[in-house]
Image (spheres, rainbow, N blue to C red):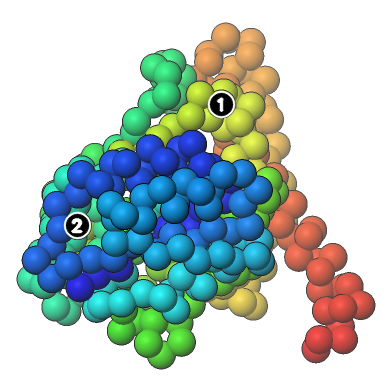
């Protein structure tokens, strides 16, 4: 048996479409259950979930502490079986999704982490500039060049990943200090856990036939949204690097030199009306600015009276 785990917050309309798609899933012969954790939603989330409880093997849980990772940790306590499949409240899995993940886990016993293909489902047709930005951190889509077989944990993303339950039996959990918590946060909800497991020696496998489509909303196809996301991505990258090497510190002269070079590229791209170079340089600049923001916030937290008392 396996458990599918979703954390959701204030996305009742999208969640309804996702759960409707789940009713079309083919079940693995060993069975499955679905756990949906309501992370302090203020909309119709609970009612939407209740409307599917007669057609899906569904368990509803409420978690009042804000944060996707806090909600996932709560959901883990209600999981059953030997495999936990994680996904999001805005995905549309292909019918054989769970069968493909189950088969990969059963035929590769020395691997503990499994990730599948994430394709886009655009709310509106994307414009050409979308191809100028990295689709993995911007839209959480997998690289189409990936092939069935061993892979690195960094190529597995939250909307389509599975981890053996035994990994969590010893107390391993998601870090609630990273990932979605309101509008302003360092990205890296599942990435932090996956990188941590990779350092511990757990191996990852890419499952080519396990496919989901990730819903890309209209507002996400706005350059201003993409550039704000670059800052959150940069914050998360610094947080992840510090998790891997706690004593390591960025070379701030080098960071600021890189920022200066991006500013020069931006100015030149504007002069030449080069839209691709302009957007690429602005994305990279905002990622670097995210490093600065995260470092500043971390310093404030370490200097706060509450942090000093905790120490």
In screen coordinates, is 310 left or right of 68? right
Q: Nearer the viewer, residue 16 or 160?
A: 16
How far is the residue under mark 2 from the one under mark 1? 30 Å
In the image, 242: left or right of 32? right
Give x and y (percent) for residue 270: 63, 14
- Classify 162 as above or below 264: below
Q: Which corner quadrant holds the C terminus? A: bottom right
Q: Residue at x 92, y 77 (%)?
A: 305
- The answer to whether 17 is drawn above or below residue 150 in the figure is above
Is residue 158 among what the camera can see?
no
Percent from the top left, x then y, of residue 134?
Answer: 43, 37
Name the mark on residue 228.
Answer: none
In this rendering, which labeled residue sits more in front, label 2 or label 1?
A: 2
- The answer to which quarter of the image holds residue 2 is bottom left
Quadrant (top left/top right/bottom left/bottom right) for the N terminus: bottom left
Work out whether mark 2 precedes mark 1 in sequence or the reverse, and give the earlier one. Answer: 2
Which residue is drawn at the image coordinates 30% and 84% (left, top)? Answer: 166
Q: Which residue is mark 1?
A: 219
Q: Position of residue 56 (x, y in %)?
A: 29, 55
- Tell me: residue 122, above or below residue 13: above
Q: Which residue occupies 61% across, 31% down? A: 225
The structure residue drawn at horizontal position 53% and vertical position 52%, both measured from the top left corner, is 46
Tag 2–tag 1 contact (CB < 8 Å): no
Mark 1 is surrounded, within 10 Å at the Cα level, by few (under 14), some (14 to 19) or many (20 or more) other residues, namely few
Mark number for residue 98? Answer: 2
In the picture, measured across the screen, residue 33 lies left or right of residue 69, that is: left
Tell me residue 98's x, y (percent).
19, 57
Q: In the rendered view, would you say 77 is above or below 240?
A: below
């Amino acid at each position: 048996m396996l458990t599918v785990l979703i954390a959701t917050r204030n996305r009742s309309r999208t969640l309804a479409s996702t759960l409707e798609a789940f009713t079309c899933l083919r079940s693995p012969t060993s069975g499955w259950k679905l756990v949906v954790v309501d992370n302090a939603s203020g909309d119709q989330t609970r009612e939407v979930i209740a409307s599917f409880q007669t057609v899906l093997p569904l368990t509803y849980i409420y978690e009042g502490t804000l944060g996707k990772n806090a909600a996932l940790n709560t959901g883990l306590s209600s999981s059953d079986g030997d495999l936990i499949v994680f996904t999001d409240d805005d995905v549309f899995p292909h019918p054989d999704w769970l069968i493909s993940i189950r088969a990969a886990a059963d035929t590769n016993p020395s691997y503990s982490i499994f990730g599948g293909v994430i394709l886009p489902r655009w709310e509106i047709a994307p414009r050409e500039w979308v191809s100028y930005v990295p689709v993995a951190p911007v839209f959480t889509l997998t690289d189409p060049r990936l092939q069935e077989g061993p892979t690195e944990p960094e190529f597995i993303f939250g909307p389509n990943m599975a981890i053996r339950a035994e990994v969590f039996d010893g107390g391993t959990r998601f870090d609630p200090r990273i990932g979605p918590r309101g509008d302003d946060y360092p990205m890296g909800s599942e990435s932090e856990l996956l990188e941590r497991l990779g350092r511990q020696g757990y191996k990852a496998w890419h499952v080519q036939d396990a496919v989901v489509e990730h819903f890309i909303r209209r507002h996400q196809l706005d350059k201003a949204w993409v550039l704000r996301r670059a800052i959150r991505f940069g914050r998360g990258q610094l947080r992840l690097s510090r998790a891997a090497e706690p004593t390591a510190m960025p070379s701030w002269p080098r960071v600021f030199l890189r920022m200066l070079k991006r500013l020069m590229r931006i100015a030149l791209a504007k002069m030449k009306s080069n839209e691709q170079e302009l957007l690429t340089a602005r994305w990279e600049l905002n990622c670097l600015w995210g490093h600065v923001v995260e470092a500043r916030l971390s310093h404030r937290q370490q200097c706060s009276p509450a942090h000093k008392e905790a120490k």
